[in-house]
């Protein structure tokens, strides 16, 4: 049995600042538990700031992204779901899951054109509820809600039954979520990151390139400014 890790993290020391770097590769069954363990360790180290990386995250389970978002957002709507029949459901942060570290710790968010579905839900929630700076490229734009219907032969058909909206009501389907600061990512960066992620798939080890990753460099620049403003 090979189990892949969906939450990877490490720390960067920049001047007097200790920055926590967290990367979520997708939102699977174990992601919420992995994130909880990661944030417990990160909180114990009292970081100056946090970089959350959702680049190339294709999404995953709706209930899992709501769990994860509730660790960052104490009170607020995570996502609105508008169904085919006109009914709209507002999914809010779940009590008891919030980490108090985010009361005072600045954060930035990295996305790119490979960020889709559940990662776009988390992006919208963090932007609308907390005004977290979003850096990178316009996201993929996949906001369809799908539901499986069982077939008599044991298979199933997944059909769209609704659409996700951000907490403010923004519809990003087929349009994507625009970052606050647009930074291109080179093909070399993408290939290098994909290779490292494949090699480290079964561990929480993460590859960080502060020299050549332009999106990360800009994110750290913005984060250091935010840290300075809070002191």
Image: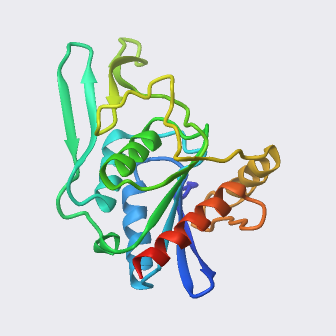
Residue at x 45%, y 85% (from the top left corner)? 45
Looking at the picture, how far across and down is residue 93, in whole percent?
A: 23, 52
Residue in view at x 33 percent, y 53 percent? 69
39 horizontally vs 83: left or right: right
Q: Quadrant of the N terminus?
A: bottom right
Camera-side residue of 105 and 11: 105
Instruction: Return the x and y of residue 92 as percentages of the image width and height.
Output: 21, 46
Q: Is residue 133 left or right of residue 125?
A: right
Spot occupied by residue 17 in the image (x, y as percentages of width and height): 55, 83
Color style of the picture: rainbow
Residue 110: x %, y % from top left: 56, 53
Q: Residue furthest front?
A: 229
The answer to which image quadrant residue 187 occupies is top right
Identify which residue is drawn at 39% across, 79% down. Answer: 43
Q: Quadrant of residue 229?
A: bottom left
Quarter of the figure that contains the C terminus: bottom left
Residue at 62% in and 85% down? 15
Q: Nearer the viewer, residue 24 or 184?
A: 184
Above or below for 153 versus 7: above
Above or below 109: residue 162: above
Horizontal relation, residue 127 to residue 52: left or right: left
Question: Looking at the image, which residue sits at the far bottom?
Answer: 16
| Residue most extreme to the right | 188
């Amino acid at each position: 049995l090979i189990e892949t890790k969906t939450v990877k993290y490490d720390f960067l020391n920049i001047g007097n600042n200790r920055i926590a770097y967290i990367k979520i590769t997708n939102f699977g069954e174990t992601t919420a538990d992995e994130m909880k363990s990661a944030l417990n360790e990160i909180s114990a180290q009292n970081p100056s700031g946090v970089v959350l990386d959702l680049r190339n995250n294709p999404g995953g389970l709706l209930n899992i992204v709501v769990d994860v978002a509730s660790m960052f957002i104490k009170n607020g709507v995570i996502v609105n779901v508008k169904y085919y029949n006109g009914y709209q459901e507002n999914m809010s942060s779940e009590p008891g899951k919030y980490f108090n570290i985010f009361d005072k710790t600045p954060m930035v968010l990295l996305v790119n054109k490979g960020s889709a579905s559940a990662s776009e839900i988390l992006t919208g929630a963090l932007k609308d509820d907390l005004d977290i700076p979003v850096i990178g490229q316009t996201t993929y734009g996949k906001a369809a809600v799908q539901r499986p219907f069982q077939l008599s032969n044991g298979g199933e058909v997944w059909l769209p039954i609704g659409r996700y909206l951000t907490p403010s009501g923004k519809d990003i389907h087929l349009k994507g979520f625009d970052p606050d600061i647009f930074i291109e990512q080179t093909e070399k960066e993408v290939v290098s990151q994909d290779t490292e992620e494949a090699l480290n798939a079964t561990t929480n080890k993460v590859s960080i390139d502060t020299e050549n990753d332009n999106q990360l460099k800009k994110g750290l620049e913005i984060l250091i400014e935010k840290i300075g403003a809070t002191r």
